[in-house]
Image (cartoon, rainbow, N blue to C red):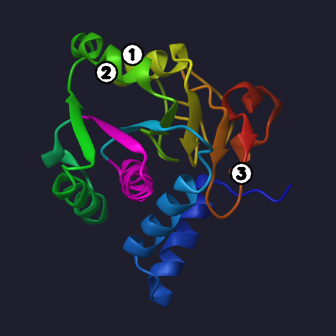
Amino acid sequence: MNTITSAEMKILEENCFYLGVSPRILMESAGKSVAENVGEGKNVLVIAGLGNNGGDGFVAARYLASLGRNVNVLLIGRPERIRTQEARRNFEILRKMEYSINIYFINDSSELKRYDYLFNNADIIIDAIFGTGVRGKIREPYASVIRRINESKAFKVSVDIPSGLDPDTGDVRDVAVKADITVTMHKPKKGLVVEKAKPYVGELI
């Protein structure tokens, strides 16, 4: 299978920007692709981090809500710490869709228990926590959230990379999402196709 490294993917993105394909367009395309591949299920829980992977999740949430799904978004961290302009813009769009999307926040693992009902009611969980930049041990509250995702009976969809999986080696140092499907962008990252990653990647799209 033709694969790329996370560094090569970053170069490809920079080339896109040079050609005039903006980060906002890339994020829109990625999030729409995720929304198109989540399968059936009325209740969707999007769990988002503060980077562009979270931004992809925000876009997917918007598309799914527009299709009549019941969408909840759980942001790990404070909104003012969302790292990129594109992700912040898409988060603000969700805030204006309060009639159809509920947004919740978690800053500490001790707060996770209060959101049990979100996990218990979800038919689909979209993992949009980390992208290709994750390295090393997963800190709290991320580690506890990932474990809670894995405990859920919902159908699990990872955006680009199962959160916690090294995109170049397929290693899991601590904990990673065990996805049913992983919707990756452009080409598979090398870590997605190694044998040891299969229990985490699920079906690769």
- Under mark 2, the amino acid is Pro
Helix, strand or loop at label 3? It is loop
Location of mark 3 (residue) = 205
Check residue 60 for magenta coloring: yes
Q: Measure the alpha-carbon separation of dots 3 and 2.
A: 28 Å
Q: Is the residue under label 2 in contact with that under label 1 (CB below 8 Å)?
A: yes
Residue 52 position in % (x across, y down)? 38, 54
In the rendered view, would you say 59 is above or below 73?
below
In the drawing, what numbered circle is on residue 164? Answer: none
In the rendered view, would you say 79 is above or below 12?
above
Per the rendered image, the range of residues in magenta is 51-76
- Estimate how packed mark 3 is, as few (under 14), some (14 to 19) or many (20 or more) residues with alpha carbons within 10 Å: some
In the image, 138 versus 149, the foreground residue is 149
Name of the residue lying farthest toward the left: 80
Nearer the viewer's eye, disc 3 or disc 2? 3
- Horizontal side, residue 133 vs residue 185: left or right: left
Name of the residue lying farthest toward the bottom: 19
Helix, strand or loop at label 1? It is helix
Residue 2 falls in image quadrant: bottom right
Residue 5 position in % (x across, y down)? 66, 54
Location of mark 1 (residue) = 144
Q: Measure the alpha-carbon separation of dots 3 and 1.
A: 26 Å
Mark 1 or mark 3, which is nearer the start of the sequence? 1
Residue 142 position in % (x across, y down)? 37, 25
Location of mark 2 (residue) = 141
Helix, strand or loop at label 2? It is loop
Residue 171 position in % (x across, y down)? 65, 28
- At horizontal 33% and vertical 17% (from top left) the residue drawn is 117
